[in-house]
Image: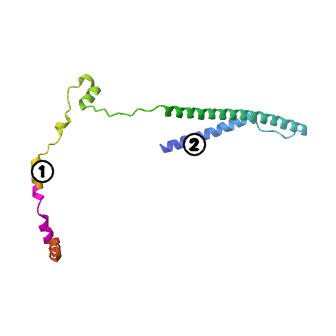
Amino acid sequence: MVAKAKDELEQELAEKEVEKERYLAEKAPPLQTGGMSFAELQELCQELHAKIDVVDEERYDIEAKVLHNTREIKDLNIKVLDLRGKFKRPTLRRVRVSADAILRSLLGSKHKVSMDLRANLKSVKKEDTEKEKTVEVSDWRKNVEAMSGMEGRKKMFDAAQ
């Protein structure tokens, strides 16, 4: 894809170069000054200066139009920004819609199956959690007293091996 784009870009550049050469050949034919007298050369220079003046006037007119249009675009952009600031956008509110209502709006009146999402949830028994808690609870003071001092460190060292 990159190679194709590169080929198209090269082709486009070549076409632009050919177009430029054609335009220059049409608008500015090569000068043949060989064998011309001094008066003829002066006349040729005057014609070229007249053509240059015409082109400069056209360029100036086009530049004036471009400046006018850019000013107008800037003014319109400022107006658009001003209008955006005048109107306050309303705050969006949360709407609670059930799964059944969503399916009804999507499928229309064909929808007959109700989706009870809570029915699919896993239930947890409270008895299991209470048993686990009672097993873990023990007197922590006995454990601290047994592990204190050098004897406790020796027990920890022996347990690690």
Q: Residue at x 17, y 77 (%)?
A: 150
Dot 2 and dot 1 residues touching (CB under 8 Å): no
Span colored in magenta: 134-145
Disc number placed over residue 129 in the picture, else none: 1
| For residue 109, above or below residue 85 | above
Three-letter amino acid code at disc 2?
Glu
Label 2: element kind: helix
The x and y percentages for residue 153 are 17, 74
User: Does the segment drawn in magenta span residue 144?
Assistant: yes
**Residue denoted by label 2:** 10
User: Does the segment drawn in magenta span residue 95?
Assistant: no
Q: Residue at x 56, y 41 (%)?
A: 9
| For residue 31, above or below residue 132 | above
**Main secondary structure along the magenta-highlighted residues:** helix
In the image shown, does 154 or 19 lie closer to the viewer? Answer: 154
Three-letter amino acid code at disc 1?
Thr
The x and y percentages for residue 146 are 13, 71
Disc number placed over residue 160 in the picture, else none: none
Q: Which quarter of the figure has residue 94?
A: top left
In the image shown, does 135 or 22 lie closer to the viewer? Answer: 135
Q: Which quarter of the figure has residue 51?
A: top right
Please state which of the two labelled residues, at mark 2 or mark 1, is closer to the viewer.
1
In the image shown, does 27 or 58 lie closer to the viewer? Answer: 58
| For residue 43, above or below residue 138 | above
Q: Which comes before the other along the chain, label 2 or label 1?
A: 2
The x and y percentages for residue 82 are 53, 33
Graded by Cα atoms within 10 Å as few (under 14), some (14 to 19) or many (20 or more), the crowding at tag 2 reads few
Q: Is residue 112 left or right of residue 63?
A: left
Q: Residue at x 59, y 33 (%)?
A: 75
Residue at the extreme top: 109
